[in-house]
Image (spheres, rainbow, N blue to C red):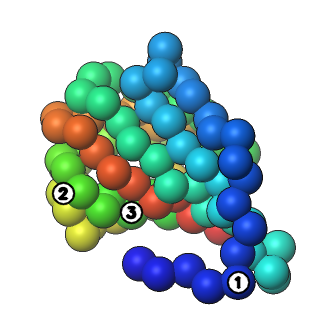
Amino acid sequence: MNFKNVSIEVAGNSYFGGAVTSRSINFADGSRKTLGFMAPGEYEFGTEAAELMEITSGELAYKLADSDKWLSVNTGQSFNVPANSKFQVEAKSMVDYCCSYL
């Protein structure tokens, strides 16, 4: 991935005692992404906007709020999260990710 004509928010986001971190990238068209890392562990997130989660490195299992099935994604794979929902993840290794807000 390579992004051009962006501004990056210097202050990072930290969740779960620093086990999940991210930085926001703002694009000229008003769109936003976050780039971050997750240490191995289990986490639950809530989202207002729909999201595309792209795994740039590592292995992750996820479960969407309307499902009782865990699915796995690895480096180079992605999954979508519906707006106004929660989802659970289990980072099986250190995970590098890009989250696009749709």
Q: Are discs 3 and 1 less than 8 Å apart at CB?
A: no
Q: For this view, does 68 lie left or right of residue 100?
A: left
Quadrant where the C terminus sits is bottom right
Helix, strand or loop at label 2? It is: strand
Amino acid type of the residue tagged 2 in the rendering = Asn
Residue 66 in the image: state x and y as whole percent: 46, 40
Q: Nearer the viewer, mark 2 or mark 1?
A: 1
C-alpha gap between disc 2 and disc 1? 29 Å
Q: In the rendered structure, find residue 5 and report the number of the disc placed on it.
A: 1
Residue positioned 69% across, 60% down in the render = 8
C-alpha gap between disc 3 and disc 1? 21 Å
Amino acid type of the residue tagged 3 in the rendering = Glu
Q: Quadrant of residue 57?
A: bottom left
From where the camera sits, is residue 81 visible?
yes
Quadrant where the N terminus sits is bottom left
Q: Is residue 26 above or below residue 18?
A: below
The residue that label 2 is drawn on is: 74
Upstream in the sequence, badge 3 or badge 1?
1
Q: For this view, does 3 lie left or right of residue 74?
A: right
Q: Are discs 2 and 3 less than 8 Å apart at CB?
A: no
Q: Nearer the viewer, mark 3 or mark 1?
A: 1
Residue positioned 54% across, 24% down in the render = 15
Circle 1 crowding by C-alpha within 10 Å: few under 14, some 14–19, many from 20: few
Q: Is residue 70 above or below residue 36?
A: above
The residue that label 3 is drawn on is: 54
Residue positioned 81% across, 82% down in the render = 29
Q: Residue furthest front?
A: 10
From where the camera sits, is residue 79 visible?
no
Residue 82 in the image: state x and y as whole percent: 57, 54
Upstream in the sequence, badge 2 or badge 3?
3
